[in-house]
């Protein structure tokens, strides 16, 4: 078991290396380089840079060198924790990303918890009461939930709140807390705001998850071991929770592997529409403005979170399912 | 449990081909049947969006911005004579904004199957026949309202349907080709090839999809034509899409290699190619079709999201996502809520695909009941 | 309709005119259609019949474990409990009394030992749970987890599992088929039940292990004096195990009687046909075995009258019109056949 986790952990840096290369190829693909764009931005804002300064920066990033050398330099800077400079914000990328990363993670994790807290009970109820009124209602909600793109749901909610209740549901904080230092009150304010974007972000996942739970549990409820447990004289709800739910749950753990990363990347769209502090909108702006090292840094963070999510689900699955635990 | 009673029915089942059985089972899903009808209608629009349009989707008129929905009435004084209520505008003296109101008294007559602007069908022949046009060619009708440039949303949705539905279909077709090909090779050849393809799939599957898609789209040259961008976006979408199918096909091949009927075919002297094409592939084609029909809506949502963020299909090309860009501003939305209608079209189309896909998947599974 | 009482003792279980039906989308399936039989304390009762004849459903009904959309529609299942008869068919399936009977007084050995244990819990955990649920059957004092575990180890030893201390902590998929079935028997015996229902306990395991498991069951039955209802389609197993036999066809009892009478003097044409289709060691080789003509009818197309009449070599006109009652035809045997009596069920 420990060996298995160790193996997976060893793979992590290798994967990140591959991703960093792919990302670098993508971000430097658009014509023109970062510095030309930088100088142009400066010129348009009225300030300028001496030829020596430009040359120094060109040297520093190796922009006159072939791509592979540029990549190598980027990688070297990354190892030192240097994500480069943002041309749009004129600030270190590491600071820009760092400011938003915490809330990005908070949104995704909160959405994840909310999703599971809603989907699992709904799935269990549907499977134990198949064809009941609530089951049918949940089926309808689920179909619509899966079919509605995140941003669409966000738009409808925002429009509805604005047009009919005249309230704004954007952002993660009330105006008075937006730039305030962290305090208990600010955390409470965050909790009061975060659930709506978290729900919007997780709605499709909730729908899908509760369907999977329902289908799995229906399968498991027909297995002979359920009859065995019933024949023991167990209380029905205890039996359902202890045996079939436990087994129906295991395959769900492997969904964490794609679901958690999907939440990280999905938050990009929701955050853009709902104007949330998040690395998603930052990436979007960086891509549009060809702020390549900022975009690269954020993409790298996304990749890391994705790989981490997959790793986490593999380890959890091994912990929960003795069949995998013993074999690995 | 068998579905049909009676010995006669059992005999009928005994001789029915697999496809017929799938059809019989599919027919029992009423929602899936209705959805299939809807999808056929949407693909008719894809074939000739101009026929369904009431006016040129690019025609702008700043004086006719944000005109609300005009609903078609079929009867006038008990006689069949279709019309739409006229819209009258008045400038608000305070906000200086045009405010449109529906005037039920003034009727704008419209005609079905009449001639309007000229267009080309699939680039093959020209026509000027339209489903519905105003009787007076000088008039404009806005069945689903107009946007900030005074463009007709109904006609734009028709054209957006063509793009979005095609992106979904083509991206899935590409995914299927890649998935079956690479998955098949992986499962049938095995060995080193298999592990290389498997690592590739793992790598692609653990890519943060939306950010990478965005970065790729952002990297597309600005001077590309809409057609080039369209195909590039399609390829980008299918880049990740094929992996799921590839895995499934590989799994099937691995399992089937050990099956008795494959051994029987081998013993009967069938060639390798014949075994693959005649014996192995038919056992999971219906499954592939079901999986693909469930993949199309995912592609559609992805395209819509990318275009909505401004990094997918680019104007002047029209897709559902491009149309929804108009709905980004909440103030505008409060003024013109009909700008959300393209989103409803997306939801309905995705819903229909999902229902058909689920129906097909159940129908394709011989052990489903 | 008084079945004979071969022994003077009172029956442990009396099933009377039991009917179970399944309301499916395409119609009503009457899986059990008027079944009656008795089980005496300590008796091994064999129930035979082709697959689909309703034997398993009958047993599920006795435990009130018929799954939806199935339902006990009528009849009685009288079970002797603390000196008086309770009608299980009237008990709420999820009620406390029924749960107490299940596992505590009537235990089940299921068909597939492979799938009958949860794969994510150890075998021991699952048996300990059963013991704790019915701990009063192990004496007055409250049992702890440790005691229950010790009991489980003892049971494993009783059913012939070697290294019981280690095996208790194994998962079912780590055990061989034979061991799994032994563990299942240990679980069934864990609460000292008075009636054991063995639903084809040996069909899923190989022949040599089968013989061992049957031997074990016989041995344990003698040791604990538990009554067993043994369900099988294998007449050879019945001959080895049972003292009394019930022959079922399409949810009805065709014939019942002591094992010797059934094997040597079968009265019902269906029993005769079944017996003819057993291959004998002394028989000639390369001769086609006699088969029962015709096929089991589709569940939706139950024949009217005697359910066996379309396939019966001795069918008469009356057989298609009326259902014969199950009545004594010899001092020991009962049969439902117009060849032996004239009484029909009331329509």
Image (cartoon, grey):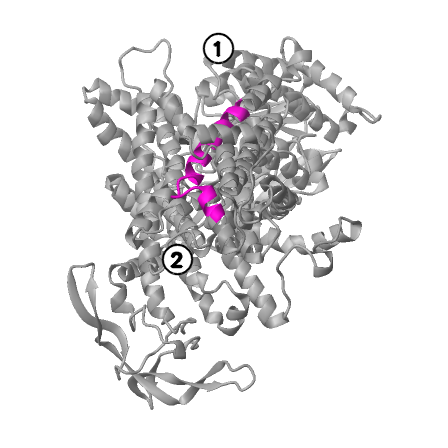
Dot 2 falls on which chain? Answer: B
Region in magenta: A11-39
Looking at this rendering, what residue extends furthest in the left direction? B125
Residue A28 in magenta? Answer: yes
Determine which residue is flagged by label 1.
Answer: C208
Question: Can residue B133 be seen from the camera position used here?
Answer: yes
Q: Residue drawn 59% across and 13% down?
A: C216
- Same chain under badges 2 and 1? The reply is no
Asked where in the image residue A192 lies, by quadrant, the reply is bottom right
Instruction: Return the chain for callout 1.
Output: C
Position above or below: B191 against B47:
above
Which mark is in front, 2 or 1? 2
| Crowd class of label 1 (few under 14; some 14 to 19; many from 20; radius 10 Å) | few
Residue tagged 2: B349
User: Looking at the picture, how far across and down is residue A313, in whole percent?
Assistant: 57, 32
* Magenta segment includes B2: no
Question: Where residue A169 sits: x, y (%)?
Answer: 63, 61
* Secondary structure category for the residue under label 2: helix
């Amino acid at each position: 078991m420990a060996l298995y986790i160790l193996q997976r952990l060893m793979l992590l840096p290798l994967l990140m290396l591959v991703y960093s290369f792919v990302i670098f190829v993508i971000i430097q693909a658009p014509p023109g380089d970062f510095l030309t764009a930088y100088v142009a931005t400066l010129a348009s804002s009225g300030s300028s840079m001496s030829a020596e300064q430009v040359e120094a920066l060109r040297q520093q990033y190796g922009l006159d060198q072939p791509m592979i050398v540029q990549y190598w330099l980027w990688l070297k800077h990354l190892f030192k924790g240097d994500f480069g400079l943002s041309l749009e914000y004129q600030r270190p990328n590491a600071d820009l990303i760092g400011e938003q990363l915490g809330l990005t993670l908070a949104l995704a994790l909160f959405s994840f918890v909310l999703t599971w807290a809603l989907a699992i009970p709904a799935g269990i109820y549907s499977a134990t009461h198949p064809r009941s009124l609530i089951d049918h209602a949940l089926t309808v909600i689920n179909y619509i939930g899966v079919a509605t793109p995140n941003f669409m749901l966000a738009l409808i909610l925002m429009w509805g709140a604005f047009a009919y209740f005249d309230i704004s549901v954007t952002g993660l904080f009330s105006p008075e807390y937006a730039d305030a230092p962290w305090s208990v009150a600010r955390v409470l304010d965050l909790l009061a705001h975060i659930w709506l974007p978290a729900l919007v972000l997780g709605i499709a996942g909730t729908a899908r998850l509760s369907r999977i739970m329902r289908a799995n549990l229906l399968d498991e409820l027909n297995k002979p071991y359920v009859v065995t447990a019933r024949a023991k004289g167990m209380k029905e709800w205890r039996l359902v929770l202890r045996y079939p739910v436990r087994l129906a749950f295991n395959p769900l753990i492997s969904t964490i592997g794609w679901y958690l990363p999907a939440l990280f990347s999905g938050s990009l769209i929701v955050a853009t529409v709902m104007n949330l502090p998040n690395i998603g909108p930052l990436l979007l702006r960086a891509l549009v403005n060809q702020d390549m090292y900022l975009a690269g840094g954020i993409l790298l963070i996304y990749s890391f979170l994705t790989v981490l999510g997959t790793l986490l689900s593999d380890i959890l699955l091994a912990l929960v399912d003795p069949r995998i635990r013993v074999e690995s | 449990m068998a579905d049909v009673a009676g010995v006669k029915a059992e005999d009928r089942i005994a001789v029915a081909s697999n496809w017929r059985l799938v059809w019989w089972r599919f027919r029992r899903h009423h929602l899936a049947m209705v959805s299939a009808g809807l999808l056929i209608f949407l693909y008719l629009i894809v074939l000739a969006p101009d026929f369904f349009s009431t006016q040129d989707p690019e025609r702008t008129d700043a004086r006719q911005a944000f005109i609300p929905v005009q609903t078609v009435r079929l009867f006038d004084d008990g006689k069949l004579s279709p019309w739409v209520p006229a819209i009258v505008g008045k400038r608000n003296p305070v906000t200086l904004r045009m405010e449109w109101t529906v005037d039920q008294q003034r009727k704008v007559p419209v005609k079905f199957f009449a001639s309007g602007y000229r267009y080309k069908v699939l680039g093959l022949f020209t026509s000027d026949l339209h489903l519905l046009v105003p009787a007076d060619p000088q008039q404009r009708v806005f069945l689903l309202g107009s946007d900030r440039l005074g463009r007709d949303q109904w006609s734009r949705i028709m054209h957006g349907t063509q793009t979005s539905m095609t992106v979904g279909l083509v991206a899935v077709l590409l995914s299927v080709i890649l998935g079956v090909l690479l998955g098949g090779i992986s499962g049938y050849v095995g060995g080193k090839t298999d592990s290389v393809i498997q690592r590739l799939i793992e790598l692609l599957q653990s890519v943060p999809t939306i950010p990478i898609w965005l970065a790729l789209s952002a990297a597309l040259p600005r001077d590309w034509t809409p057609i080039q961008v369209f195909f590039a976006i399609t390829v980008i979408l299918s880049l990740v899409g094929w992996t799921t199918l590839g895995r499934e096909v590989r799994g099937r091949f691995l399992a089937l290699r050990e099956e008795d009927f494959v051994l029987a075919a081998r013993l009967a002297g069938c060639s390798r190619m014949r075994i693959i094409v005649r014996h192995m592939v038919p056992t999971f084609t219906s499954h592939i079709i079901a999986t693909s029909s469930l993949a199309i809506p995912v592609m559609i949502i992805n395209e819509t999201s990318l275009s909505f963020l401004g990094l997918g299909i680019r104007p002047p090309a029209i897709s559902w996502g491009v149309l929804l860009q108009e709905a980004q501003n909440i103030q505008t939305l409060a003024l013109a809520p009909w700008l959300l209608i393209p989103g409803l079209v997306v939801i309905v189309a995705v819903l229909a695909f999902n229902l058909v896909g689920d129906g097909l998947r159940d129908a394709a599974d011989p052990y489903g009941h | 309709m008084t079945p004979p009482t071969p022994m003077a003792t009172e029956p442990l279980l009396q099933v009377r005119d039991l009917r179970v039906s399944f309301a499916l989308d395409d119609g009503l399936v009457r899986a059990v259609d008027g079944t009656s039989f008795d089980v005496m304390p300590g008796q091994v009762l064999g129930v035979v019949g082709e697959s689909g004849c309703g034997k398993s459903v009958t047993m599920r009904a006795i435990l009130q474990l018929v799954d939806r959309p199935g339902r006990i529609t009528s009849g009685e299942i009288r079970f002797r409990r603390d000196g008086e008869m309770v009608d299980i068919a009237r008990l709420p399936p999820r009620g406390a009394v029924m749960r107490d009977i299940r596992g505590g007084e009537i235990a089940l050995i299921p068909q597939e030992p492979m799938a009958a244990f949860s794969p994510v819990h150890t075998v021991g955990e699952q048996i300990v749970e059963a013991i704790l649920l019915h701990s009063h059957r192990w004496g007055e004092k409250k049992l702890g987890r440790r005691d229950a575990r010790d009991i489980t180890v003892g049971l494993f030893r009783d059913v012939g599992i070697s290294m019981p201390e280690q095996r208790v902590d194994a998962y079912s998929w780590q055990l061989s088929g034979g061991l799994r079935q032994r563990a299942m028997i240990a679980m069934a015996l864990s609460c000292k039940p008075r009636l054991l229902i063995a639903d084809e306990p040996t069909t899923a395991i190989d022949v040599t292990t089968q013989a061992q498991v049957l031997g074990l069951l016989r041995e344990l039955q003698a040791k604990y004096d538990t009554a067993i209802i043994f369900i099988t389609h294998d007449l050879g197993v019945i001959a080895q195990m049972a003292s009394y036999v019930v022959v079922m066809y399409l949810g009805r009892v065709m014939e019942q009687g002591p094992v010797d009478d059934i094997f040597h003097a079968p009265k019902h044409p269906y029993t005769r046909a079944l017996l003819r289709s057993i291959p004998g060691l002394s028989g000639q080789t390369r001769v086609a075995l006699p088969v029962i003509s015709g096929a089991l009818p589709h569940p939706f197309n139950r024949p009217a009258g005697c359910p066996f009449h379309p396939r019966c070599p001795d069918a008469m006109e009356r057989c298609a019109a009326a259902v014969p009652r199950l009545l004594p035809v010899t001092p020991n045997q009962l049969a439902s056949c117009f060849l032996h009596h004239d009484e029909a069920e009331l329509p």
